[in-house]
Amino acid sequence: MNDREVPVIAVDGPAAVGKGSVAREVARRLDFNYLDSGRVYRAAALLAA
């Protein structure tokens, strides 16, 4: 990986199975940033309304 490449880990699955909890823990253990895409989509929807 060169200096410009950023690793991305996506966690997918059905509702209410713990994706967010797992993703936050993975991010913490690997010292990665965590992005809750659901929050991003909800914020965009609120701004568009």
Image (tube, helix red, strand yellow):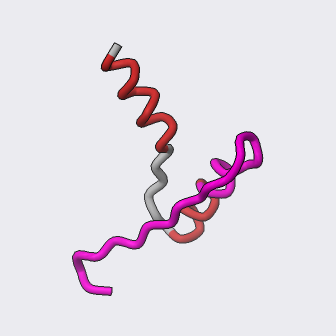
Question: Where residue 18 sits: x, y (%)?
Answer: 73, 49
Residue at x 67%, y 51% (from the top left corner): 19
Relative height, residue 12 to residue 16 (above, below) = below
Lateral position of residue 30 relative to residue 16, left or right: left
Secondary structure mostly taken by the magenta-highlighted segment of the chain: loop
Question: Where residue 9 sits: x, y (%)?
Answer: 51, 66
Question: Where residue 37 sits: x, y (%)?
Answer: 47, 43
- For the magenta stretch, what is the residue range? 1-23
Question: Where residue 20 sits: x, y (%)?
Answer: 63, 48
Q: Quadrant where the C terminus lies?
A: top left
Residue at x 56%, y 61% (from the top left corner): 28
Residue at x 39%, y 23% (from the top left corner): 45
Residue at x 64%, y 59% (from the top left corner): 25
Q: Quadrant where the N terminus lies?
A: bottom left
Lateral position of residue 11 relative to residue 18, left or right: left
- Asked if residue 35 is among those painted magenta in the image, a careful observer would answer no
